[in-house]
Image: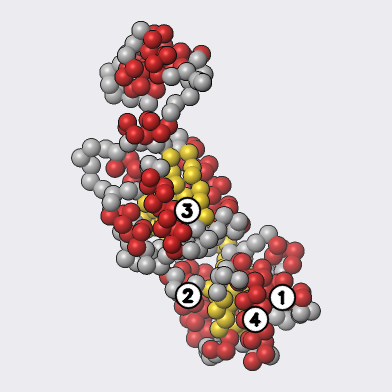
Amino acid sequence: MGASLKDIACKLNLSKTTVSWVLSGQGDKKGISAETQSRVLACARSLAYEPNLLARSLNTGVSKTIGLILPSISDTFFAHIADRIESEAEREGYSLMIAGSNSEPERENALIRLFRSKKVDGIIIAPADASGREVGRLAESGCPVVLFDRCLAKTDAGCVVIDNEAGSHALVRHLAARGFRKIAIITTFPHLPTMELRHRGYLRALAEAGLHADPRLYGEVAYAGYRQHVCDTLDRILATVPDTDGFFFTTHILATEALRYFHDRGIDISDGRLGLACMHEDPLFRLAAPRMSVARFPVEEISAHAVRLLLRQIRESQSPGSVRPAPESVVLPCRMEFRDE
């Protein structure tokens, strides 16, 4: 069993309270001399003292822990986001608790309640529940919370997103400018504002190019069993509009499954006769679809802004008498890569 606060206090003939203040970083605030603080820290190191984080959070209300809830931990985009957020948090002295909602609203709500019970100082979340019920309660309770990738219109929380409409508009406009006329859209989660904006950008680009938005070229894929649903959707589109000459994918996951479909069906995408574009990318694209144009998401910027906004809220919430800062929204541009030129 490791050393305790009592062990350090007895060894130095100090009170446990004094030792606790020093080890929690409150030595200067409590007027403890620099010499005493140095003695406490040196003794803690010599005894290999490990703080009881749960006890400290109960005593101080500060756990130095951030919760991160992702729709999918295996998704390359969210995995990269988690990696960068963890690095940003560690730089500021915070540890990270990560959980995946599997894009299930009830699971997401349960995770929010779980993180609250674990006394995290704040939560960063890419919401799956478009109603924002639990997220709204979280924000109203005063718990620091920041949304990313997906904002909720009626939720009083900070948010970091990419410019979804501008990115999709640029991609589809590019396909139209290259001469593709029957451009299908493959999308999912239409209830999310993110996907609604990507669809809006698609429609706007078609209208500007004088192209008809043929409902037969609209493909909506359910998340559960999405691999089979992508195949069924593409089968249906190519059966009803066999001269479809372009595809716009609203997520890289849908595009990845479509590439598998094209390979299995013997559809050649290497000669450029089929226009392809996707919001974000997967490393696979460079090999399997080098001519696919993409709107790359600024992962590092998204992560840095999410942590910055959350820490701002955390610091304000921990300052007695402070006024809670107004929610701040950050919209970041995508980096466009037109790879078929």
Tell me the SS state at disc 1: helix
Instruction: Look at label 2 and name its amino acid.
Output: Pro
How many C-alpha atoms fall within 10 Å of the one at disc 3: few (<14), some, or many (≥20)?
A: many
Task: Give the residue at x 73% y 76%.
Answer: 262
> From this viewpoint, which residue is outermost toward the left?
321
Q: Distance between the residues labelled 4 and 1?
A: 10 Å
On the image, which quarter does residue 260 sit in? bottom right
Task: Give the residue at x 45% y 35%.
Answer: 93
What residue did someone put label 3 on? Answer: 69
Position of 181 with respect to 15 (left or right) is right
User: What is the number of callouts on the image?
Assistant: 4
Contact (Cβ within 8 Å) of mark 1 with mark 3: no
On the image, which quarter does residue 27 sit in? top left
Tell me the SS state at disc 4: helix
Q: How far apart are marks 4 and 3 (CA)?
A: 31 Å
Q: Is residue 197 visible?
A: no
Query: Which of these two is toward me, 268 or 71?
Result: 71
What residue did someone put label 4 on? Answer: 232
How many C-alpha atoms fall within 10 Å of the one at disc 2: few (<14), some, or many (≥20)?
A: some
Instruction: Look at label 4 and name its amino acid.
Output: Asp
Task: Give the residue at x 44% y 73%.
Answer: 191
Instruction: Look at label 1 and name its amino acid.
Output: Tyr
For residue 45, above or below residue 216: above
Instruction: Look at label 3 and name its amino acid.
Output: Ile
Q: How far apart are marks 2 and 3 (CA)?
A: 21 Å
What residue did someone put label 1 on? Answer: 261
Position of 162 with respect to 233 (left or right) is left
Residue 190, numbered circle: 2
Q: How far apart are marks 2 and 1 (CA)?
A: 22 Å
Q: Where is residue 151 in the image (x, y as percent from the top left)?
A: 40, 63
Residue 132, numbered circle: none
